[in-house]
Image (cartoon, grey):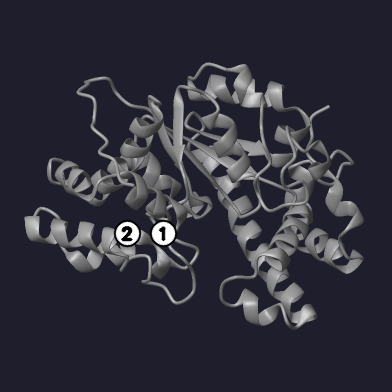
Amino acid sequence: MSVAVHAPETSVKTRYIFIVGASRSGTTLMRRTLNRSDQIAICRENHFLGHWLASEGARHKFRQFGDLSNDANARRLVDYIYSGAFAKSSAFRGVSSQWHWLTAHVDQAEFLRRLLASERSARALFTLLMQVYAEYRGGSILGEKTPAHVRYVPTLLDWYPDGRIIHMLRDPRATFVSELHRRKKQAVTTPYKQLRRIGFLFKLFILAQTTLAWAESASRYFKYRQRYPDRYTLMKFEDLVTHPERNIRRLCDFLGADFQASMLRQHVVSQGFQHGQIGFDAQAADRWKTLIDPWIDRWFVFWFGKYLRELGYLDGRNGAQP
């Protein structure tokens, strides 16, 4: 059932948090950790700026409606989102989860009113998407989690000068094992449904996918850390799950938010090995070692040895801080 969400009238400058990284790197865990705070409201994946396939990004699809300063265009766009046409716009994947939340929880007429009262730009629409979620939850620090937005960090920090980026990174070997496990359980989209029937090709596809995504994520980290030293930080998955309190406190200092003990109370919901577990799964840092094929282990070391050493993944610690 849809409900109206009204914006509080305020002149206080809002802060924004964006969580990015490759798939299976801990972005969902980070979102849930921060959302345990009563100050923070980070919405779900939306792929607004873009997808790993650029044409699958919401912003790309919304361009068909033209200049939003035209009332008719803005109305057609909102109807496109709420009518279900947007949800059916891709033959490869379902629409990202935040759009389902929006149409289920925010009244269409209210969302349109808010859009018409805004500056009517892509940035304004993206901001509104985050605002209505934060107002629903009661958080004063807004944000969103879309792993593929790692490609759009410059845009995010240009649009939101007071924003902060959390880049999640995980050992690619662990990422591969986790992604393979998840896709075997949830092969519900193209091409996973077709490839799962051919075990070796399925594994090769996941390997290629993980290799390309991790390469891009890691290379962007080494670039962004130099370019945005004060507004961008890395959080390794292994550090988060093995020493959560220490690393969450550090992160809160970076974000300008209060550390709250509630952030340490987690319920594992991602489709990994410990689905349903209470608390942080510290064993996830090393579990891949008993599950990975030796040749796949060697594959990642061959291609990413330099990165793995610099990130602490080849020194016996797997990135976890002592």
Look at the picture and state if 246 lies above or below 142: above
Residue 163 location, quadrant: top left
Number of other residues with Cα within 10 Å of mark 2, as a class: few under 14, some 14 to 19, many 20 or more: some
Amino acid type assigned to the residue bearing label 2 in the image: Arg
> Can the viewer see residue 288?
yes
Residue 138's tag is none
Q: Position of residue 40 (x, y in %)?
A: 46, 27
Q: Is residue 252 left or right of residue 316?
A: left
Quadrant of the rendered image containing residue 50 = bottom left
Residue bearing mark 1: 50
Determine whether the residue tagged by mark 1 lies in a helix, strand or loop.
Answer: loop
Judge from the rendering whether residue 112 lies leftward or rightward of residue 45; answer left or right.
Answer: left
The x and y percentages for residue 32 are 57, 36
As displayed, is residue 279 above or below residue 276?
above
State the quadrant of the C terminus: top right
Q: Amino acid at mark 1?
A: Gly
Please say whether residue 67 is visible from this viewpoint. no
Which of the two discs, 1 and 2, labels the residue nearer the N terminus?
1
Judge from the rendering whether residue 30 lies leftward or rightward of residue 314; answer left or right. left
Find the distance from the CA under tag 1 to the CA under tag 2.
7 Å
Tell me: residue 194, above or below residue 139: below
Residue that numbered label 2 is attached to: 59
What residue is drawn where x is 27% and y is 63%? 83
Which residue is depicted at the point 18% across and 41% down?
114
Query: What element does badge 2 sit on?
Result: helix
Residue at image point 38% right, 24% down: 140
| Residue occupying the point 50% across, 25% down | 255
Do the CB atoms of the residues marked 1 and 2 lie less than 8 Å apart?
yes
